[in-house]
Amino acid sequence: MKWEVPFFDLDLGEEEKQAAISVIESNWLTSGPRTEQFESAFTEKYGDDIGAVAVSSATAALHLSLLALDIGPGDEVILPSLTFVACANVVRYLGATPVFADISSEENWNISPADVALKVTTRTRAVMIVHYAGYPCDMGAFTQLCEQHGLHMIEDCSHAPLGKWRGRPLGTFGDTGCFSFHSNKNMTTGEGGMLISRDQDIVDRARKLRSHGITTSTYQRFQGHRHGYDVVEVGYNYRIDEIRAGIGIVQLNKLPSQNRKRKVLVEQYRELVAEELPGVAVPFKECDDESSYHIFPVLLPGDETLRDRALQNMAERGIQCSVHYHPIHRFTAYKGIVTTVPLTDQIAGSLLTLPLYPSLTTGKMELVVKELKACLP
């Protein structure tokens, strides 16, 4: 259907088009110079001591992170339930057990350091941090907690490219940082992801694992490296292609300005909601760190029935909203895992995500708030 206000709108233009055409004209379509350039451009944003591995998705980046940290059967990984299911799925890929932690508060929907601390056991090997909606988690608390218990830390920065905590880039606190370039993210390649790490051993291993465990790439052999290669462990096909890497370079260059636009829009949204919808709560109002403002979630004054009715009514009015997220522990595949997350359960039925993207106009934003007001009792 044709939306009056879509949930998300892509920002792709002539630069991305020319980047794709340039790859096609080069006759080298995968695992080549654009991929290397994309990785180099990413490391320039995150520091000279950071290595980057471009992959096919953030899911792949998370999976490779756990593999590189030797997470396996009998291990536990603590993560939020209020996130995308891929975070838990990759833990189960390896035969490990996801342990779900609660959000910090009704104001802060990021994973709670205090609840994580309560759920650490002798089997816990890692904590997966998710910077929900682009707002930084308390990285001071998590760094201290992981050091105290000898735990690995994986940062899921799918919502938070170029976000910072106390001036330091998100993704550089943990053993790895994982990024998504899905079509609805702040920067996109359609599908795609990136793993970054200061640990060169992790980077080297992830680079091999993304391509079947092979020690050299096709492009390296094309450049004159010896023809032979070894397969040092069972790997995967998690490579990104050259067209997506080329588009990614353009999108990465646009990202700072796009994030700034998002910040302005979120500030306007907050003012509109406060004026027109006093019963609707907006989380993360107290965030003093540098967010990427990926999505704009709100908490409606009612239960799941009211939220679902509002979703339907907004759709009928041509406005596409969403839910971020249905908690993982409620899905059929995860109901066997005993989970106590009272705050997550408390907000889950009332949260609603409103449209947000850099080209969203003030008029469209006012329309969203006006129509939501009409949908609520």
Image (cartoon, grey):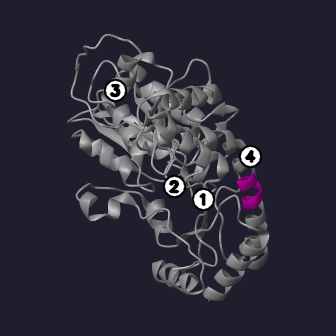
Q: Which mark is residue 68?
A: 3
- The x and y percentages for residue 243 are 49, 42
Residue drawn at the location 41% of the way across and 35% of the way down:
30
Task: Say which element carries label 4.
Answer: helix
- Magenta segment, principal secondary structure? helix
Considering only order in the chain, which callout, 1 or 4, is on the residue closer to the N terminus? 1
Residue drawn at the location 24% of the way across and 33% of the way down:
72
Are discs 1 and 2 less than 8 Å apart at CB? yes
User: Is residue 263 within the magenta segment?
Assistant: yes
Cα separation between marks 1 and 2? 7 Å
- The x and y percentages for residue 21 are 55, 44
Q: Which mark is residue 361?
A: none
Visible residue check, residue 255: yes
Amino acid carrying label 1: it is Leu
Amino acid carrying label 2: it is Ser
Considering only order in the chain, which callout, 2 or 4, is on the residue closer to the N terminus? 2
Give the residue pinned by disc 2: 183
Give the residue pinned by disc 4: 257
Q: Which residues are magenta?
A: 261-266
Considering only order in the chain, which callout, 3 or 1, is on the residue closer to the N terminus? 1
Q: Which mark is residue 10?
A: 1
User: Vertically, is 371 above or below 259?
Assistant: below
Considering only order in the chain, which callout, 2 or 1, is on the residue closer to the N terminus? 1
Residue drawn at the location 30% of the way across and 37% of the way down:
237
Amino acid carrying label 3: it is Ala
